[in-house]
Image (tube, rainbow, N blue to C red):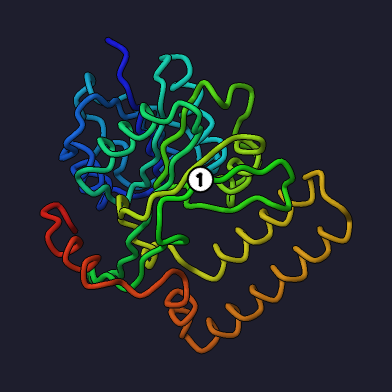
Amino acid sequence: MQTKKIAVVVPVYNRESTILKSLKSLENQTFKDWFCIIVNDGSTDNTKEVISTLDVNKYLVVNFSKNMGRGSARQAAIDMVRSLKIPYMCMLDADDFYFPDKLEFQFNYMEQHPDVTLLSSAMALSDKNNNLYSVIRPFENETAFYFNSFINFIQLPHASSIIRIQDIEGVNYDKTFRFSEDLDFLRRILIKKKYAFTPRIHYGYKRDNSFSFYKYFKSISFNIKSFNRLEVSILQKIKYATTSVLKTSVVFILSIFGVEKLYLSKVGQKPSLQDCKKYENFEGKF
């Protein structure tokens, strides 16, 4: 196989009904020089059968015999990216989708900014009925970041990012993390690195499909574990854990009354008319 410019990694667990739609958004990209690595994390539905007929020139499928967790799935993917010597890596979850210009814009940006390790983009959040209700856009303008202390780390969306592989040699996903493996990874690969954010929407996130209080609780728990391993003061660790527990308590109370969507509605910002138009005009939306 001729080396491609971008590897798109897709960890999947029991997503037989959505993964082909996600991959359709990849195949509809204006940028064609990509290769997709799918890690089937021991799915118990028909996911393995669904992806078994994919074009071997475009897709590499790794099947785990049992569910190992997202940290293991993502690490298997990045190991493959490195072995294939593909210079850039992007992520795509098996129930989300790309907007058509994502890979083209991000590839051109990284080529024009060789000092940048990662570029993240805004994300459109839609519900089960495919209604756009929020946009994760931490900054209104294109912005660059650098931090040399973990306390100064500014979190950006992992799912919508492109990563320059040569800049993160020796840094891996934690295989023991079944949740928050992405945030833990970002903290460690970006310290003393330049990274950036564009307010352009490139990624569609079906958050309602995957949100539950249990998953939220586990994500917070693993995130606290991740933070406790960092080179920060005991006071900072206590502060971080306390804030996280308070947030979890709020979501728990909301979930008791079945209104946890109130929490989801506060994540991100209200879509603008321009955002809605772009979303509605996206031919591959689902």
Q: Position of residue 204 (x, y in %)?
A: 30, 56
The crowd level at tag 1 (other Cα within 10 Å; few <14, some 14-19, many 20+) is: few
Say which residue appears at 82% left-offset and 59% top-offset.
Answer: 236
Q: Nearer the viewer, residue 41 or 92?
A: 92
Asked if one can make out residue 133 in the rendered structure from this viewpoint, the answer is yes
* Badge 1 amino acid: Ala
Q: Position of residue 271 (x, y in %)?
A: 30, 71
Q: Position of residue 50 (x, y in %)?
A: 24, 39
On screen, residue 61 above or below 226: above
Figure quadrant of residue 216: bottom right
Whether residue 141 is situated above or below residue 72 in the rendered picture: below
Residue under pointer 1: 144
Rendered residue at 52%/40% (across/down): 195
The secondary structure type at the circle numbered 1 is: strand
Q: Is residue 175 visible?
A: no
Q: Residue furthest bottom?
A: 257
Residue 273 is left or right of residue 214, and the answer is left
Q: Nearer the viewer, residue 93 or 29?
A: 29
Q: Is residue 265 left or right of residue 56?
A: right
